[in-house]
Amino acid sequence: MPASIPRLRFAPSPTGYLHVGGARTALFNWLYARKYGGQFLLRIEDTDRARSTDESTRAIFEGLEWLGLGWDEEVVHQGANLDRHQADARRMLDNGTAYRCFCTQEELAERRAAAEARGESFRYDRRCDRIPAGEVARRVAAGEPFTVRFRVPDGTTSWDDLVHDEIAFPNKDIEDFIVLRTDGTPIYNLAVVSDDIAMRITLVMRGDDHISNTPKQIMLYRALGAELPRFAHLPMIHGIDGKKLSKRHGATAVGDYQHLGILPSAMLNFLALLGWSPGNDVEVMTLDRMIELFDVGGLQKKAAIFDPKKLEWMNGQHLSMISAAELLERVVPALEAEGYATVAELEGRRDWLLGLLELLKVRARTIDDIVRQASPYFRGAIEYDPDAVAKGWKDRSGSAEILERTRETLASVPEWTAASMEEALRALAERLGFAEKAGKVFQPLRIALTGLTASPGIFDVLLVLGRERTLSRIDDAVAWLRASATPFAR
RNA sequence: GGCGGUAUCGUCUAGGGGACUAGGACACAGCCCUCUCAAGGCUGGAACACGGGUUCGAAUCCCGUUACCGCUACCA
C-alpha cells in the first residue's frame, strides 16, 4: 500500500493502433490507481513527428474508451512540452551534468562502423567533454550545431523494481547519451523524465523493454534534482511462436477484437491474466473484482504468450455472465448491420429479443456468433444446410410425412407453451413408433425450422418462432422435400 | 559481441524449504446429462531447462551452463 496518493500514467506513442500489449499496460496502471485511490493519466508521446499521426491518437482514445479505462486529468501531449524539455536540458548544461557535443551523425556512424569492424563495441569516447569552455563558447557563437549529451557518472545505478526486485546496472556500461538533438528536440529519455516529473508520477509501470532505459532515466531524475518514482516492469506479450506479438500473429489491435465480437470485460479479464494472477485459482472476474484483487505481488516476470483460444473461452464466460439486457446494446447494432431488422423494430420487440438472446448467449463465444445464430429467427425464408439435409432428412418422403403429422399436432395444440407442445410431440413420437426416440420427430422439425442440425432446445425455438411462422416453415419444408424426392422413390 | 531480464504441463498460471505421488484454467480425448448444439459435471494424458552446491530435506535459496527475450540510434 503506497504512502501517498499514487499517480500513474500510460504513455503510448501514436504510431499505430492500440496494441493488446499497450492495453494490458494501461489496464495494470489503471487497476493500481483505482485500487489505491490514485490517478491514472494518459500521455501521448508524439515527439517523433514523422511517425506520429492523429489517426493513431484517435485509435488509442477509442480503444481505451471501449475498454472502459478512463483517464483522470486532461491528456498530455508530449510534443506540447518542448519548452520545458529544452529548459531541462539547459539546466543540466548549467549544473554540469551534461555537455555539448559537436560530433556529427556521420562522424559517429563512421566511428561506430570502425569499432564494429574491429570487433569492439562502440561507446562514445567523450571527446567533446574535453573541449575547453572557451572553444565551446566560440563554436556555439559561430552557429555550429551541437547535441546535448548527458555525462554518465561513475558507480552503479540500481532500483528496487516492483516486479523484479533489485536491478542494477554498472554505469560504465552506459555511454554518455544524447538528450537533446541538434534541432533542439528532446530524445525519448529526456522527454519521458521531464514529463513524468512535471506530471508528478509516483509509479512508472511499463513494459519490460524499458528496463535498460531505466538507469538512464534515474540518472536524469538525479541530475534534475527530482524525487524518484517507483518502477514496475511488466513482462512482454508474445505471439504463439514465442516471438514479439506482431501483425503476423493475426489480430493484435484492441479494435480488431472489438470487431470480432469480443466483450471489453472479457478482453480486460483475459489481458489481466497475462502476466498477473490473483491466486486461489481465480480466473473469471468482473472489473470490480479485478480492482479488489489486484496486487503487484501477483505480477509475473516471465513473458506470456497470447492465446486467442483462451480469449474466446473467456468471452464465452462473460457472455453467459452478463444479462441479456446488457447484451442488447452490443447486439442490436450488429443485427441491424446484418440487415435483419432496424433498431426501431428491435426496440418494438424488446422482450422477444431478450428471450432469444437468453437462448443464444450460452451457445455463443462472441457477439458475432450470436448474430450468426440469430439468423433463422429473423429471415423470412431459410436455407437448408446440405449437411443437415443429408443427415436429418435422408429419407425425403419419410421426413415429409413426419413433418406433416408434426404440423397437424402443433396446429391443434391447445396452447402455445413449451409444456403442452412437448406433451403433444412426445405423444406423436410414440404413435409413430418412436418411443424413447423423440429425436426422430424433433430433428426433422429442427431442420424445417432453422435449416440446421444445431439450435437451442426445440421447444424454445417453437416459442421464439410462434405458431404462425412455425406452421408456414413446416409447409415450406414439406414442399421442398416432396419436390426433391427422387422419382424412383415411388 | 556487451549489458540486462527470464526459465513449472503445448498455452496461461498456483507454488515462496517439508502440506508436491506439483494444484487450477485453456486446448485435446473419453464418459455423463440430453431432442441437436452449447453450457455444466466427471475422468484422462501432459510440466519443475540442465549441472553443481547449501540443507536432515529444494520446484522453492546460491552458483554455473544452456535457451529465449529486451536494450545497445541525434526511434519511442
Image (cartoon, coloured by chain):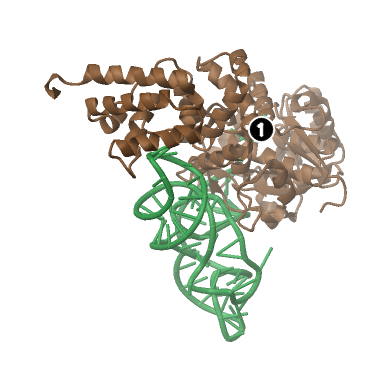
Residue A432: percent from the left, percent from the top? 29, 35
Which residue does the image show at 49% across and 33% down from the upper left? A418
> What kind of residue is marked 1?
Leu
Residue A16 visible to an observer of this rendering: no
* For residue A157, above or below residue B38: below
Residue A47: percent from the left, percent from the top? 70, 26
Q: In this view, does A293 lie to the left or right of A107?
A: right
Which residue does the image show at 47% across and 22% down from the upper left? A467
Q: In this view, does A184 lie to the left or right of A115?
A: right
Q: In this view, does B6 lie to the left or right of A214?
A: left
Residue A310 visible to an observer of this rendering: yes
Q: Which chain is brown?
A: A
Residue A316: percent from the left, percent from the top? 54, 39
Residue A69: percent from the left, percent from the top? 71, 34
Which quarter of the rendering shows the N terminus of chain A? bottom right
Secondary structure of the residue carrying tag 1 is helix
Q: Which chain is green?
A: B
Q: Residue furthest left?
A: A488
Which residue does the image show at 33% across and 23% down from the upper left? A384
Q: In this view, does A62 lie to the left or right of A381?
A: right
- Quarter occupied by residue A216: top right
- Number of residues whose C-alpha sits closer than 10 Å to that of mark 1, classed few (under 14), some (14–19) or many (20 or more): many
Which quarter of the rendering shows the C terminus of chain A? top left
Label 1 sits on residue: A67
